[in-house]
Image (cartoon, rainbow, N blue to C red):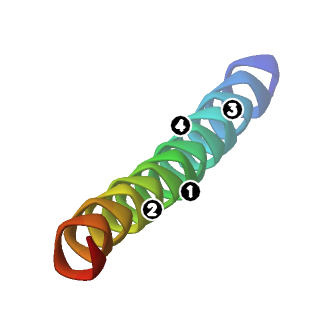
Amino acid sequence: MTAQFHKTTEEEYEERLRNLVRVVSACTLGLWSFAAGLLIGTFLLF
């Protein structure tokens, strides 16, 4: 029973890690898009 509990905890850890990576990657993509928009806007306005 202890091994099964450890396995479940390990699976939950991997799932949480995957979700964290998704959130971080989405935030990074958003920041890159924002920076690109600022760069393009700067060249178009000035």
C-beta proximity under 8 Å, tags 4 and 1: no
- Label 1, on which residue? 23
- Label 4, on which residue? 14
The tag earlier along the polypeptide, 2 or 4, is 4
Foreground mark, 2 or 3, reads: 2
C-beta proximity under 8 Å, tags 2 and 3: no
- Image check: 30 left or right of 9? left
- Of 33 and 22, nearer the camera is 33
Q: Residues within 10 Å of mark 4 (few under 14, many from 20)?
A: few
- Label 3, on which residue? 4
Q: CA distance from mark 3 to mark 1?
A: 29 Å
Q: Amino acid at mark 2?
A: Ala
Element carrying mark 3: helix
Element carrying mark 1: helix
- Image check: 26 left or right of 1? left
Position of the C terminus by quadrant: bottom left
C-beta proximity under 8 Å, tags 2 and 1: yes
The tag earlier along the polypeptide, 3 or 1, is 3
Q: Residue at x 30, y 66 (%)?
A: 42
Q: Does 13 appear above or below 16?
A: above
The tag earlier along the polypeptide, 2 or 3, is 3
Q: Residues within 10 Å of mark 1 (few under 14, many from 20)?
A: few
- Label 2, on which residue? 26
Percent from the top left, x then y, of residue 19?
Answer: 56, 54
